[in-house]
Amino acid sequence: MKNRGDVFWYILLILFIIVLSFISLFIGNISIFPLTENTLFILENIRIPRLIMCILCGCGLSVCGCAYQAIFRNPLSDPYILGVSSGASLGAALAIVLHLDSIFFGVSFMSFFFAMLSVFLIIKISSVGNRLHTTTLLLSGIAINFLMSALISILMIFNQQNMDEIIFWTMGSVSVSRYSDVLITFFSVFISITIILIYAKDLNALLLGGDSAKNLGVNVEKTKKVILFFSTLMVGIIVSFCGVIGFVGLIVPHIVRIIVGADNRRLIPFSILGGIIFMLIADILSRTLIFPSILPIGAITSLVGAPFFIYLLYNAKKQLNP
Amino acid sequence: MEDKTIIQVKNLSYKIRENIILNDVSFSLLEGGFYSLIGTNGSGKTTLLRLIANNISPTNGNIIIDGKDIREYSPKSLARKISVVNQENEFLFDFSAHQIVIMGRMPYQKHLQNDSKQDLDIVKQSMLLTNTWQFKDRSIKELSGGERQRVFIARALAQKTPIILLDEPLSSLDIRHKIDILNILKKINEENNITILIILHDLSLSLQYSNKIISLKKGNLFGFSSPQRILTKENIKNIFDVKTQIIDNKYIVFDE
C-alpha cells in the first residue's frame, strides 16, 4: 500500500478487471447489441448481478484463504479443503428442507451457522495441546467434507422435490437474480475484508506462532476469534447464494505470495485483485468452453484447483523428506 | 549503578493436572544482570521462562515485572517490557529477515499504521548490531541456524525492551556461533543495560558469561547465586548426575 511500485500494479490490475468485466457482460446466448428494452433487461437482471457476485466471490474467498492460512498456520488451508464450504452448503440445504428460505436471511444464517460449526469441529479435532498439526488439520477437513456430503445426500433422498435446488449448492454458480442477495453479500464481504485488513500485521505475527505473536503484544485469542468469525461469515454468506466454489482461497494467495511475499499487508490487497481476476476468468470460461451450454463455475475452479493442490502437496512432501 | 529489581518471582507454582512442573519458586532479578537458567531436561526451565513471558499462567504465585504484577499489563504494554527469543520453530512462510525484525516494532504501532522512519532506523540499528543487515532481504527459510537466531535477537532488540528472555538459543549451533551470539548478548547487556535471562545447556559458557545462575532441579529452585558458587563439583553432580573437575574456578572438565 505504501510504495509507488505497488500503486502502479494496483492500477494495472484494476484496468484488467474492468476489461474482463466487459467481456463477461457481453458473453452469452443472447447478444446484448443492439441495446433494446429486452437486452437491457437481460443486462440489468442477469448479467450485472452475476458479474458483481462473481467479483464478490473472488475477493471474499481469496481473503478468507489468506486469513485461514495465517490463523491455522498452514499454507494449504482453504475454506473448501477444510470442509467449511460444505458445512455451509449443508446449512443451506437444511434451510431449504425446513422451508426457512421464506424467512429473511434464513438460508444465509443457517449457512453461516454450519460454517462456524465446521470451523469449531476442525479446531477440536486437530489441536494437539494448543497447536494445530498440519496433517491432522487437512485430514479433519477431509473427514468433515465426507460427513457433510453424506448428510446432504441423505437430505436429498428424503426431499426429492428440493433435489435440484440442493444440487445447485454442491456445484457452485454465481447466477443470482435478486439484488437483495447481492447487497447482503456485498456488505458481509466488505465489512469482513476491512476488518481482516485492519489485523494484517497481527496475522503476520501469528504466522510465527501463538507464543511469538503474544510476545509481540498481539491479543492472540481475541484476534483469532475475530478473524475466524469474519472470514467464516464471508464464506457462509457466499455459499448461501453461490454454493460451493472450491480452491479459490488456496490458489490465489499462493500465486500472489510467490510474487509479493508473505507480508499480509501486501498479500491481502493483491489477493483481493487476484481473486477477482481469477473468478472472472473462471466465469468467462464456464460460459464459453461448451457454448451455448454452461459449465458450473465450481467445476472450473476445482479443475484448476485440485491439480494445484496435488502439486503443493507433492512439493511439501519433498521438503519434508528430501 | 543502582540495584533495581526488574523481575520478581514469588512462590511460583505450575501444575498440569496433578503433575507438578514448578514448585514454589521465588527469586528476584536486578536490572542489567546477565542471568542464565540451568537444569536437566524436564526440570521446568522452559516452563519458568514461558511463565515470565506470560505465555502461560501460573497455578499459584505472582510475577512482578518492573514493579507491576504481570496480570495488570495489557499484551502491548508487556511487549514493551519483555521480548522473547523462542526455541527454533518451523517456518512455513517466506518472510525476509527484515520483515521478521520489523515485527519487533508492533508493540509501538497501531493497526494499519505504516512503519515510520524511526521504526526503520531502529530496525536498521538492531540488524547492524547483530550482524544481520547484510542478508536483510533473504528469506528466513534460507538462513542457517546461527543466522536465524541473530535475526530473532535483532527482533528482540528492535522491541526496545529492558528485558530479553531466550529459550535455548544456542542449541544446534557450533561453538563459533554460540560464542558469537553470547558476545552480542553480552554487548547489549553491558551497553544498553538490558536484563538477559537465558536458558543455557553449556555449563562452561554459563560460567563465563553470567553474573548469576538460576538452577532448577525437578521443578524446585536448587540454587540462585554467582556462577562460581553454583557450578561446583558437588552441585553439578547433584543437579546433572555427572562427575566433573573444575580447574581454576573457570574450566569444567567432565570426569566420567
Image (tube, helix red, strand yellow):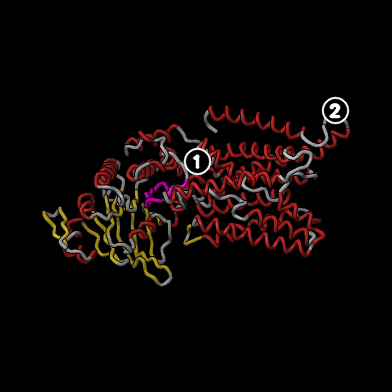
Image vertical order of residue A181 relative to residue A121, above or below? above
Residue at the disc numbered 1 = A262
Q: Crowdedness of circle 1 by 10 Å Cα count: few (<14), some, many (20+)?
A: many
User: In x, y percent, where is residue A155?
Assistant: 74, 63
Image vertical order of residue B84 relative to residue A49, above or below? below
Classify residue B206 as left or right of residue A256. left
User: In x, y percent, where is residue B226?
Assistant: 20, 56
Identify the residue at image location x=72%, y=64%: A154
| Quadrant where the image shows the C terminus of chain B | bottom left
User: In x, y percent, where is residue A243?
Assistant: 71, 50
Q: Amino acid at mark 2?
A: Pro
Mark 1 or mark 2, which has the lower sequence index? 2
Q: Is residue B77 visible?
A: no
Q: Residue furthest front?
A: A290
Residue A87 placement: quadrant:
bottom right
Q: Nearer the viewer, residue B121 or A277?
A: A277
Q: Crowdedness of circle 2 by 10 Å Cα count: few (<14), some, many (20+)?
A: few
Residue B187 placement: quadrant:
top left
Choose mark 1 or mark 2, whichever is in front: 2
Residue at the disc numbered 2 = A34
Residue B29 placement: quadrant:
bottom left
* Residue B63: mark in rendering: none
Span colored in magenta:
B79-92
Q: Amino acid at mark 1?
A: Ala
Identify the residue at image location x=24%, y=64%: B240
